[in-house]
Image (cartoon, helix red, strand yellow):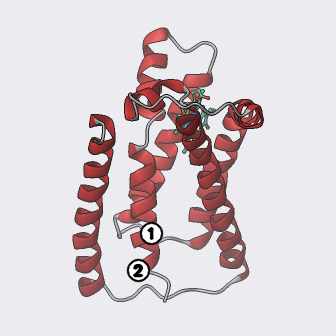
Amino acid sequence: MLSRGLKRILSFTAIVFVISLVYFIYVYLAYPKVPERETFLTEMGEGFGEIGLWLLLFIYGRTLLKILIGKGKIAHRLLPDYHPTLDLPLLEKLLVFLNRTHVYVGITAVAVILLHIAMMGVPMRIMFFPAVLALVIWQGLFGLFLSWRYSPTELKKFSYLVHAQFVTGIMIGIFALFGHLLIDD
Ligand code: HEM
């Protein structure tokens, strides 16, 4: 049986996907197709986009690894009955490295994605794009509050709640996917 946490994540993903699909069809039919521009700036911007995607995969890879090893609150919430018998010191070492570097990888991911958006000259009237922009800034801002030594305890707690979860990531993934489908051929 799926845990309640897992069921909620899957339902959330399905709902966001369906709403996005409906909005995608609306934009596809109502707006003229966004032409793809090819300038020096957009060529560079494309590179940043690709790096941003890899960094996000890397970041969520850490979270998946934590779940696999059964470490942390997210793992216990999503798979409460899972007690891994794995004893893989190499994976543990990898996780220590990923935990130590998360803040830097996170800041780089936010910066690279912002550069990508700025350089591509994204059509902001298509709601997918301002939404992705806001979500990435959200993730970065609360990550900062979470790691900042002087954040008051309440702010830290709130930041953990809204930063250390899959909800923003799911929306970023689905919105970015549909947004790009409206631009690329
Ligand atoms: C797009 C950028 C980012 C994404 C997608 C992201 C995602 C995540 C996720 C999913 C977690 C929970 C991991 C877990 O508990 O297994 C987490 C935790 C955390 N993040 Fe981020 N993050 C980003 C940027 C940042 C930034 C910029 C900072 C700080 C400057 C930061 C600081 C933290 C801290 C302190 C934790 C809690 C401790 C830990 O799990 O290491 N994050 N982040």
Helix, strand or loop for disc 1: helix
Q: Quadrant of the N terminus?
A: top left
Decide: few, some or many residues near mark 2? Use Cα within 10 Å; few <14, some 14-19, many ≥20: many
Tell me residue 154's x, y (percent): 42, 12
Sooner in the amino-acid sequence: mark 1 or mark 2: 1
In-front residue for pair 71/168: 71
Tell me residue 165's x, y (percent): 44, 37
Q: Amino acid at mark 2?
A: Leu
Q: Residue at x 39, y 71 (%)?
A: 178
Residue 85 is marked as none
Say above or below: 57 vs 47: above
Say above or below: 119 vs 27: above
In the displayed structure, does residue 177 sit left or right of residue 61?
A: left
Say above or below: 119 vs 146: below
Per the image, the residue denoted by label 1 is 177
Q: Quadrant of residue 104?
A: top right
Q: Quadrant of residue 36?
A: bottom right
Per the image, the residue denoted by label 2 is 182
Q: Residue at x 31, y 54 (%)?
A: 13
- Quadrant hosting ligand 1: top right
In the displayed structure, does residue 158 sit left or right of residue 67?
A: left
In-front residue for pair 41/17: 17
Say above or below: 25 vs 90: below
Tell me residue 96's x, y (percent): 73, 29
Decide: few, some or many residues near mark 1? Use Cα within 10 Å; few <14, some 14-19, many ≥20: few
Q: Quadrant of residue 106?
A: top right
Marks 1/2 in contact by CB < 8 Å: the verdict is no
Q: Residue at x 50, y 10 (%)?
A: 152
Q: Residue at x 44, y 55 (%)?
A: 172
Helix, strand or loop for disc 2: loop
Disc 2 CB within 8 Å of nearest ligand 1 atom: no
The mark lying in front, picked from 1 and 2, is 1
